[in-house]
């Protein structure tokens, strides 16, 4: 299957032709074109990352398999996280294959797929920092998370229970937060448990996980537009996800990137 990677500047050029498109049946339109255009931010390892300019990660591998099941090619777009959900609503692409935390508020606005990852919040600290051994130890410390993320909101809520609260700092992407952690400008980073675990495994002398995670269990899903137009597309993608549960592809892809496979529900979880 041919995958094409387009940077943000190129997206601006093609978006005019895509913006405003509305279809009674998005799946039928995608099959007629023979291609689905999916957007993510490629700076969220291990779900999405660029390696020597090549898009890789859990979401790349999973969605490539989904496109095979749909019988279409996939075109991946690399966009800043803050522009992805607004871009979907504006019709600039077909679908969001970024790992988006499933929340009740977002479900009012978008159609989500079944879970594709664990989004429960966990902390990473600098390796050897004995001042943080549990989540409560971030009281009064500088902690970074990604602007616009559900994990940031959960960090803020958790911080408000501490005395004193943490000094919560917002970053454009999680790579910037980890860079500040490595440089000692902040003392911890909060994000999804898989992402923090991946950072710790990849750079064991630099980062360590802080366990247990905090907050309610959360899950990542992929996102289609709200309303009726995307429902057939979401149903077809859910069928592909369930098929990958059954034939082992979902487990194998997770083990490739995480060293283990999270226990993911095969029906839509109750969310808050």
Image (cartoon, rainbow, N blue to C red):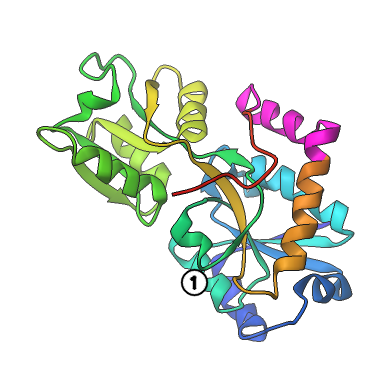
Q: Position of residue 127 (x, y in %)?
A: 34, 18
Q: Position of residue 51 (x, y in %)?
A: 61, 42
Q: Is residue 51 left or right of residue 235?
A: left
Q: Is residue 247 magenta?
A: yes
Q: Quadrant of residue 230?
A: bottom right
The answer to whether any part of residue 80 appears in the image is no
The answer to whether any part of residue 109 appears in the image is yes
Please name the residue shown 66% across and 26% down the image: 261
Please name the residue shown 47% across and 53% down the image: 103
Majority SS type along the magenta span? helix
Please name the residue shown 65% across and 71% down the image: 93
Number of disc labels:
1
- Work out whether 249 lies above or below 30: above
Q: Is residue 246 magenta?
A: yes
Q: Position of residue 49 (x, y in %)?
A: 58, 44
- Work out whether 8 lies above or below 171: below
Q: Position of residue 54 (x, y in %)?
A: 66, 48
Q: Is residue 260 left or right of residue 244?
A: left
Q: Is residue 169 left or right of residue 205?
A: left
Work out whether residue 147 or residue 223 is closer to the camera in this orientation and state it. 223
Q: Which residue is mark 1?
A: 86
Q: Is disc 1 surrounded by few (<14), some (14 to 19) or many (20+) residues within 10 Å?
A: few
Q: Which residues are magenta?
A: 244-261
Considering the numbered disc 1 on the image, is that residue within a helix, a strand or a loop? helix
Q: Quadrant of residue 200?
A: top left
- Work out whether 71 lies above or below 198: below
């Amino acid at each position: 299957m041919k995958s094409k990677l387009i940077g943000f500047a190129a997206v601006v050029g093609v978006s005019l032709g895509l913006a405003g498109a509305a279809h009674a049946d998005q799946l039928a339109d995608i099959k007629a074109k023979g291609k689905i255009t999916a957007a993510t931010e490629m700076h969220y390892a291990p779900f999405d990352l660029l390696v020597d300019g090549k898009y890789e990660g859990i979401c790349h591998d999973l969605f490539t398999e989904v496109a095979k099941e749909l019988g279409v090619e996939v075109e991946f777009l690399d966009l800043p996280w803050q522009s992805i959900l607004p871009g979907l609503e504006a019709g600039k692409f077909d679908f969001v294959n970024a790992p988006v935390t499933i929340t009740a508020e977002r479900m009012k606005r978008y159609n989500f797929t079944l879970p594709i990852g664990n989004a429960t919040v966990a902390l990473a600290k600098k390796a050897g920092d004995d001042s943080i051994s549990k989540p409560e130890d971030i009281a009064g410390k500088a902690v970074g998370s990604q602007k616009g993320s559900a994990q940031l909101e959960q960090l803020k809520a958790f911080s408000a229970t501490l005395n004193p609260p943490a000094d919560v700092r917002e970053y454009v992407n999680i790579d910037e937060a980890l860079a500040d952690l490595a440089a000692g400008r902040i003392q911890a980073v909060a994000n999804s448990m898989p992402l923090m675990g991946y950072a710790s495994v990849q750079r064991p002398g630099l980062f360590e996980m802080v366990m247990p995670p905090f907050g309610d269990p959360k899950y990542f899903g992929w996102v289609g537009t709200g309303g009726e137009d995307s429902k057939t597309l979401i149903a077809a993608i859910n069928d592909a996800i369930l098929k990958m549960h059954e034939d082992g592809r979902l487990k194998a892809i997770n083990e490739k990137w995480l060293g283990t496979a999270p226990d993911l529900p095969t029906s839509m979880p109750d969310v808050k």
